[in-house]
Image (cartoon, rainbow, N blue to C red):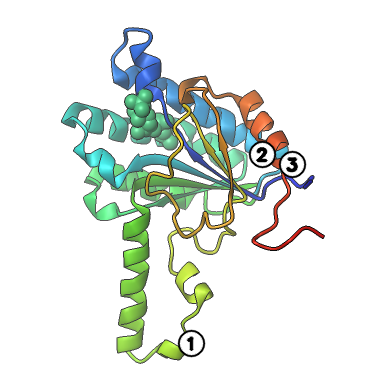
Amino acid sequence: MNRDVPRHIAIIMDGNGRWARSRLLPRTFGHHHGMKAVGEVVEGCIEAGVDVLTLFAFSEENWSRPADEVSSLMNLLEEYIAKETKKLRRNGVRTRILGDRTRLDRRALAAIERVERETADGTELQLGLCVSYSARKELTRAARIIAEEVEAGRLDPSDIDETTVASRLYTAPWPDPDLLIRTSGEQRISNFLLWQLAYTELYVTPVLWPDFTRRELFDAILDFQDRERRFGKVSV
Ligand code: FPP
């Protein structure tokens, strides 16, 4: 058993569309309600003493959704930042956006830069919002950065180790997630934090993301605390 509170929790927030469909509402309503659940987990993590929370908000693959859904998700991100920045700042939540910014429009970029700037002093919780994020692209980008450093003579290939790679990922300098939560019952990683999840405990719940509350978060933490983490070794 392991009574520790996870230092880093990562969440694949899934099921917004199904939540809306079961109420005969447009999918975008599901995303809107999903935003409330984001507030719940941010506050729940502070309460529980978690250091880092990483949320999968918009994948690289999500760009292929219908244009109105993509723009509604981008608007939600901007709305979240407009509404929540003050509170994030007050609660000491340092917020960073992880992903490929080159695909974001000027308004989304400005919003992102604003929340990062205005919450930069936060020390209670580190919040990572993955936007236009793909783990394979993150790893490809790290490989490119390393190759450029080698080419420029700043890095010797024989010095490349796991730390070299990890420190060039978007999540640096955070520790790897201890716990990954995926809502809506799907049992997939979906190109999320492929490197960082190597030894992470997985927790899948049938609850759809808009229904996810602090209570569900605490249930996931309690479940995590009942697990024995061996990191490939034998129990002692
Ligand atoms: C997956 O549900 C969820 C998303 C693609 C978007 C997640 C976005 C939010 C929770 C709201 C905005 C968040 C922030 C941080 C502002 P789905 O649409 O794939 O659901 P389905 O599988 O039931 O169709």
Q: Amino acid at mark 2?
A: Ile
Q: In the rendered structure, are the residues bearing label 1 and label 3 in contact, judged by CB atoms less than 8 Å apart?
A: no
Marks 1, 3: nearer the viewer: 3
Residue shown at the point (58%, 24%) measured from the top left: 213
Q: Which residue is mark 1?
A: 159
Question: Can you tell which mark lies on residue 46?
Answer: 2
- Residue 211 horizontal/vertical position (percent): 51, 19
Spatial CA distance of label 2 from label 1 is: 38 Å
Compare marks 1 and 3 and give the one earlier in the sequence. Answer: 1
Marks 2, 1: nearer the viewer: 1
From the viewer's side, name the closer residue of 185 and 124: 185
Location of residue 214 with respect to 158 vertically, above or below: above
Farthest left residue in view: 67
Marks 3, 2: nearer the viewer: 3
Q: Which residue is mark 3?
A: 225
Farthest front residue in view: 234
Count residues near mark 1 (Cα–Cα under 10 Å), then give few for <14, some for 14-19, many for 20+.
few
Count residues near mark 3 (Cα–Cα under 10 Å), then give few for <14, some for 14-19, many for 20+.
some
SS type, badge 2: helix
Q: Amino acid at mark 3?
A: Gln
- Residue 234 horizontal/vertical position (percent): 74, 61
Residue shown at the point (70%, 57%) measured from the top left: 230
Residue shown at the point (48%, 33%) measured from the top left: 84
Residue shown at the point (33%, 43%) measured from the top left: 59
Spatial CA distance of label 1 from label 3 is: 37 Å
Compare marks 2 and 1 and give the one earlier in the sequence. Answer: 2
Q: Is residue 79 visible?
A: no
Q: Is residue 78 visible?
A: yes
SS type, badge 3: helix
Q: Amino acid at mark 1?
A: Asp
Q: Which quarter of the figure has residue 92?
A: top right
**Which quarter holds ligand 1?**
top left
